[in-house]
């Protein structure tokens, strides 16, 4: 955040019930003062903001956390500037051993005045609702995977092996139902696990259906549809990308998006020594996982699939050209990296990093104007 003289900087340490508030004047020599604690309610926040009226320009900040963005929207509606700070990027002195809400609020105000804080992107209410729905579906998918792992481990532990390669088809379910055990407790345990898996699958299907129904009403629907022109990107992957990233135009270059997704190599260099390691794994893990899943498809030859043809037909020639450029480039790159002896996991990660660049290009071309 840029520091401006004549501005009152306000740091708020937010908890479920209380707000610790501190202020700092625009000059560096001005003292940082604690205003005390306030209830974390809209009425109490409104009274706090009214106390700050008439003290010049006001800039407020607080840490991103489980309380969400309600405070941000209330401060902005009041006419004050507000930013939500990334907690992992707040500078911390190594020697500090005392932590209280009051001290945290004063530290936020001081760092905001110094311009040392990094803000996060705040979605609007509609975007936040879609993101919550996407995350609910992801939670349901994780629950389904866990339930299926329990069933697979159970039958393997009892020496039952399915002879075909593809599990969780209707044939596989019939095979599970045909299993019998000597002790009735084993039979009951298997049936309960199968029922839990069915419930998880039904929940996942319901949430997927809700996403499919709501996407056409979303203002980012054109970008979601265009992203599906890329190989390895289906509806859920495209919706997850747009819901988690939001406005891709806030990333000036695709490299910054790659860094945000944690897909760039880590580095520890000093003097003449340069050491690079694996990817940083920083930033948004949900999108990173979707990209790596989609990157596996580039091990196949470069040609549009039958389903992709229907999607490509509805896209502009510009999007079609980008999709084909991505497919031809990434399939060739995958093959060359494998021939050089790279591990398939390393190659897939490299492909996912470049996929992010192509998705950045398509999304910024198809998003609605600001």
Image (tube, rainbow, N blue to C red):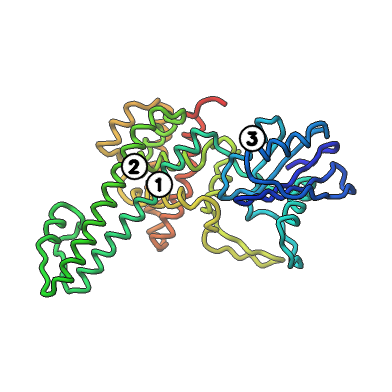
Number of callouts in the render?
A: 3
**Front position in the image: 11 or 361:** 11
Q: Which residue is mark 3?
A: 74
Comes first in the chain, label 3 or label 2: 3
Residue neighbourhood size for the residue with mark 1, other residues' Cα within 10 Å, grouped as few (<14), some (14–19), many (≥20): some
* CB within 8 Å, label 1 to label 2: yes
Residue in view at x 66 percent, y 50 percent: 18
Circle on res. 207: 2
Instruction: Say what secondary structure mark 1 lies in.
Output: helix
Left or right, 151 with reference to 322: left
Q: CA distance from mark 1 to mark 2?
A: 8 Å
x, y percent for residue 240: 43, 42
Comes first in the chain, label 1 or label 2: 1
Circle on res. 185: none
Q: Is residue 164 visible?
A: yes
Q: Is residue 251 visible?
A: no
Instruction: Say what secondary structure mark 2 lies in.
Output: helix
Residue in view at x 28 percent, y 44 percent: 205
Comes first in the chain, label 1 or label 3: 3
**Front position in the image: 66 or 144:** 66
């Amino acid at each position: 955040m840029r520091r401006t003289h004549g501005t009152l900087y306000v740091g708020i340490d937010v908890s479920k019930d209380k707000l610790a508030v501190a202020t700092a004047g625009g000059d560096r020599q001005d003292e940082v003062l604690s205003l005390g604690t306030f209830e974390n309610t809209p009425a109490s926040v409104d009274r706090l903001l009214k106390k700050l009226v008439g003290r010049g320009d006001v800039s407020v900040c607080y840490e991103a956390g489980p309380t969400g963005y309600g405070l941000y929207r209330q401060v902005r509606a009041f006419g004050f500037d507000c930013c939500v700070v990334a907690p992992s990027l707040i500078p911390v002195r190594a020697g500090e051993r005392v932590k209280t809400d009051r001290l945290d609020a004063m530290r936020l105000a001081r760092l905001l005045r110094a311009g040392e804080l990094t803000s996060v992107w705040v979605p609007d209410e509609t975007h936040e609702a879609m993101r919550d729905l996407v995350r609910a579906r992801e939670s349901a998918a994780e629950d389904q995977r866990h339930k299926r792992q329990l069933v697979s481990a159970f039958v393997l532990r009892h020496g039952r092996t399915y002879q075909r390669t593809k599990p969780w088809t209707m044939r596989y379910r019939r095979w599970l139902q045909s299993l019998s055990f000597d002790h009735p407790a084993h039979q009951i345990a298997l049936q309960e696990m199968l029922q839990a898996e069915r419930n998880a699958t039904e929940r996942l299907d319901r949430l997927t259906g809700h996403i499919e129904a709501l996407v056409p009403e979303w203002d980012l629907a054109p970008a979601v549809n265009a992203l599906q022109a890329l190989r390895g990107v289906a509806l859920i992957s495209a919706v997850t990308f747009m819901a988690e990233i939001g406005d891709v135009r806030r990333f000036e270059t695709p490299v910054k998006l790659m860094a945000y997704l944690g897909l760039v190599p880590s580095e520890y260099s000093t003097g003449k020594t340069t050491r690079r390691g694996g990817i940083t794994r920083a930033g948004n893990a949900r999108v990173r996982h979707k990209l790596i899943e989609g990157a596996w498809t580039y091990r196949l030859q470069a040609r549009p699939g039958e389903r992709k043809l229907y999607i490509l037909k509805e896209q502009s020639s510009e999007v079609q050209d980008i999709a084909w450029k991505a497919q031809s480039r990434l399939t060739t790159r995958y093959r060359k990296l494998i021939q050089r002896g790279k591990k398939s996991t390393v190659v897939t990660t490299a492909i996912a990093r470049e996929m992010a660049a192509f998705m950045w290009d398509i999304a910024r071309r198809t998003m609605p104007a600001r």
